[in-house]
Image (cartoon, rainbow, N blue to C red):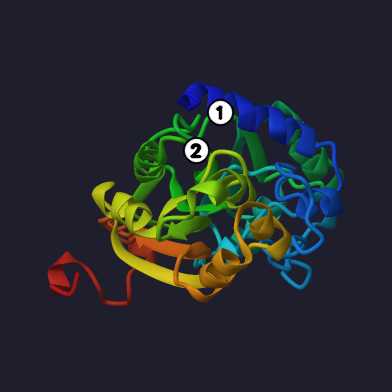
Amino acid sequence: MKSPQELKQLVQERYAKIAEQGKAENASSCCGAATPSNKVYNIMMEDYSGVSGYTEEADLGLGCGLPTAFAKIAPGDTVIDLGSGAGNDCFVARHEVGPSGKVIGIDFTPAMIQKARQNAERLGYNNVEFREGDIEHMPVSDGIADVAVSNCVLNLVPNKPGVLAEIFRVLKPGGHFSISDIVLLGELPDTLRQDAEMYAGCVAGAIQKEDYLRYIIEAGFEKLTLQKEKTITIPEDILSKHLSAKEVEEFQQGTTGIFSISVYAEKPGSRHTQPLAASKRPAGCGPESGCC
């Protein structure tokens, strides 16, 4: 069993290699982590091509959802993207926040940060910033973000409660997150576990859905909402390497499996606690009127 630090180093090395690959290579090998299956392509990733702000050069095909589509991003918001890769989700978020907003992408792989910065500079995006850092210890101050998003990244992190605590820290009171990630339901067959974790967990492995949602509540979040859930079908050529024909049939017909979820939750409090400036108060509204 690898230590958390060894897992992080493995992920970092793997993603440095992925940064040099094309989208088709990455998608066909599930984050570049396993031997390609002829049925793997497009099983996990979602189609971004019709999404406003989509940047093809920044899409490495590594996601498992469209968290920005569910994130309720508003003009002027500050958004943090955990595990920002080459920057695609950041650029989609930038379209939503507009010129008055800001997007901060965080990634601990230097090659990814370099690629994302090159993309932003080429596009002339001045309100998108990429910071190198571990999402368990994000290089941002407390309470600066209105929204946090992440796409198929927390499954890579050994200390998931630690990341959720960091998300809670960096969000403003009343801020929220939308995260797309991979979870498990039921116990995978032992002979399948190693390959399945490489396939669905992209190296570090996914955890049980029940535990994932429980960690969110234990971190202090409220209004937890499961926004989307999709079954990830393990290609039969992978199953057949580890299971008999009967076991493959039982697995395919059973409830045990791998799922992509998009989940939303809020930090308690309100972002709108400042009193209105006098110039923005309704006509006739003042302390003497009793209306404010």
Q: In the figure, is residue 33 to the left or right of 285?
A: right
The picture places residue 244, in percent across and down from the top left corner, at 61, 61
The picture places residue 89, in percent across and down from the top left corner, at 66, 54
Query: Is there CB contact under 8 Å for labels 2 and 1?
Result: yes
Front position in the image: 140 or 279: 140
Mark 2: which secondary structure? Answer: loop
Q: Which circle's residue, 2 or 1, is located before the other in the chain?
A: 1
| Quarter of the view holding residue 168 | top left
Q: What residue does disc 1 label?
A: 8
Front position in the image: 273 or 16: 16
Q: What residue does disc 2 label?
A: 157
Mark 1: which secondary structure? Answer: helix
Q: In the figure, is residue 217 to the left or right of 99?
A: left
Is residue 60 something that shows in the picture? no
The picture places residue 2, in percent across and down from the top left corner, at 50, 25
Name above or below for residue 233 compared with residue 25: below
Q: In the figure, is residue 48 to the left or right of 167?
A: right
Q: Which residue type does callout 2 highlight?
A: Val
Is residue 18 something that shows in the picture? yes
